[in-house]
Amino acid sequence: MRKPYDPPRELWLYDDRGMKKWQGWFLSDHSAALEADALQAEGLLVRPEQSETEVGTILEISLSEGLAVTIQLNILEGDRLLPDIKGYVRGYDEANHVVLATAADHQQKIRLTDIRNVILVDQDKWYREGIDDYGIQSDQSVSK
């Protein structure tokens, strides 16, 4: 079998960048895979189980102050816990469920006995760190 003609690089008419021109394709595929792995790994962080009174207290704070919560359910899927549920407490129903408003205004009912751990979500945004109420960097002194 004959090998196809492969001229040496110095005889090429243009400078081929090789695989560099395909990096955008690999990067987007890689990013999508990393996001999928992060979603699966979310169930790996096992927080300590809270009592019903602790869970109820945090849910009441979330409801009264309008703060977001992250709820970890005590339900296993295979050998992992289900992914955390993030949202705002909207109330309770007669069947002992907490009504949670999740992303895109979807409402989800969660049985109180299925809740393993509840934490309040920190409302400070990353872009607000180090800035006071007037938009001034708090580590810098203001001259008058």
Image (cartoon, grey):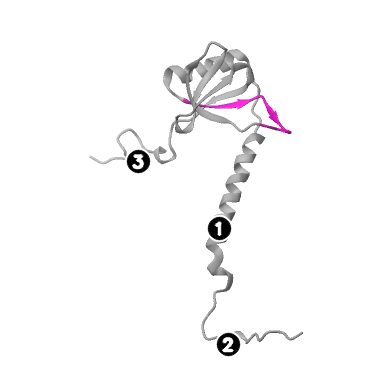
Circle nearer the N terminus (1, 3): 1
Q: Are marks 1 and 3 in contact (CB under 8 Å)?
A: no
Query: Does residue 77 show up magenta in the picture?
Result: yes
Q: CA gap, disc 2 to disc 1?
A: 30 Å
Instruction: Residue 85: give x, y in percent of width and height.
Output: 56, 29
Residue 21 is situated, as x and y percent measured from the top left of the image, at: 53, 69
Residue 84 lies in quadrant = top right
Q: According to the image, label 3 marks what residue?
A: 137
> Is 104 displayed left or right of 36 in the figure?
left
Residue reaching furthest front? 1
Vertical relation: 119 (above or below) 130: above
Q: Which residues are magenta?
A: 68-81
Which secondary structure lies at badge 3?
A: loop
How many other residues sit within 10 Å of disc 3, few (<14), some (14-19) or many (≥20)?
some
Q: From the image, which quarter does the N terminus lie in?
A: bottom right
Residue at the image point whose x is 63% and y is 45% from the top: 37
Furthest residue in direction bottom, as rendered: 11
Report, in whole angstroms, how far the alpha carbon at label 2 lies from the one at label 3.
56 Å
